[in-house]
Image (cartoon, rainbow, N blue to C red):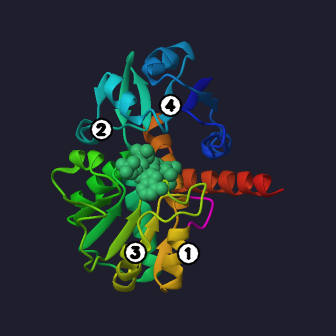
Amino acid sequence: MKHFALFGDPVAHSLSPAMHNSAIAGLGIKAHYFLHHLINGDEIIDAFFGLNLQGANVTVPHKEVAAKLAHIKSPEVEKIKAANTLVLKQGQIHAFNTDIGGFMLALKKLQEKSQKHSIKNALILGAGGTAKAISYGLKNSGIEVSVLNRSAKRLEDFKEFKTDTWESFEVKNFDLIVNTTSAGLKDSTLPAPKDILMPLLKQNSLAFDVIYGRQTPFLSLAKEHNLAYADGENMLLFQAVLAFNIFFENKFNPQEIQEFMSNGLAKARRLVLQ
Ligand code: NDP
């Protein structure tokens, strides 16, 4: 029996066990995926070995420390210094970041749905770990990325991009706007002041919010402007499919994994709504 876990703080709300255990059961694998509430991120490697894990996912606020402490890092993890997937190989913990690929696959779905096949430039709202993953993925696809954040400090990690705070920002046309802030996660706030967002949304053509499970004020505003938009549910699903493939060394068909995970996600949602 192989053991997998999600490390995070908080972690109880996560839908990852529903997705992974659904694929594990569907594919007839002898394994189990569970939540592990880890408060001190510095203990992540000890916890990994202590729980006798084969692999793990990592969520807020431990992605940076996971990247730092893993023994071997993928080029993406080396670059953005954040990892969401750990796997044990020959006694060493290897770190990956599947948020990047998860976002890019979810964006592709949105482009297909909206018939918008070409994106030349994108604006990212927020400058945290998720913004780093997404800006990396977009830049690697040849898209020009700008980053807009409430405050200046975190923008220091985005030296290769055009960056602004709300004070210095001048509105221009973007093909895509991505909200990576946690504004709207549990409240009704927008990720930037309305006088910035309204003219932006009038001009751009796609809106993406990494938050999932609710229509955020940002997506409501995008809808009011008749934009094509997506929330973070597909990103969540695709990052999990990619992580599962890493856990099991690409032994299973991604389409099959996705179907099982999608069913697990829908079932978990129905239980939450009951
Ligand atoms: P971080 O804590 O690293 O970054 C948060 C960012 O949001 C900062 O730039 C911060 O600005 C900004 N911010 C926070 N609150 C506000 C606000 N009220 N108004 C404007 N800006 C604000 O978070 P992460 O990048 O790790 O995560 C961000 C979100 O992404 C979370 O909601 C998480 O659930 C989601 N996520 C979704 C995934 C998916 O699969 N769908 C995958 C990964 C994450 P400042 O610097 O000024 O503080």
Q: Mark 2 against mark 1, which lies toward the viewer? A: 1
Q: Mark 1 against mark 4, which lies toward the viewer? A: 1
Q: Which mark is residue 56?
A: 4
Marks 3/2: CA–CA distance: 31 Å
Residue at position x 54%, y 54% from top? 237
**SS of the residue at dot 2?**
helix
Q: Give percent across and percent down for residue 260.
A: 63, 52
Q: Nearer the viewer, residue 62 or 32?
A: 62
Q: Which mark is residue 77?
A: 2
Label 2 sits on what residue type? Val
Residue 12 falls inside the magenta stretch: no
Marks 4/2: CA–CA distance: 15 Å
Which stretch did the figure color magenta?
212-216
Q: Residues within 10 Å of mark 3 (few under 14, many from 20)?
A: some
First reached walking from the N terminus: tag 4 or tag 2 = 4
Query: Is residue 250 rendered to the left or right of residue 187?
Result: left
First reached walking from the N terminus: tag 4 or tag 3 = 4
Marks 1/3: CA–CA distance: 12 Å
Mark 3 highlights which residue? Answer: 197
Label 1 sits on what residue type? Ser
Toward the front, the furthest residue is: 167
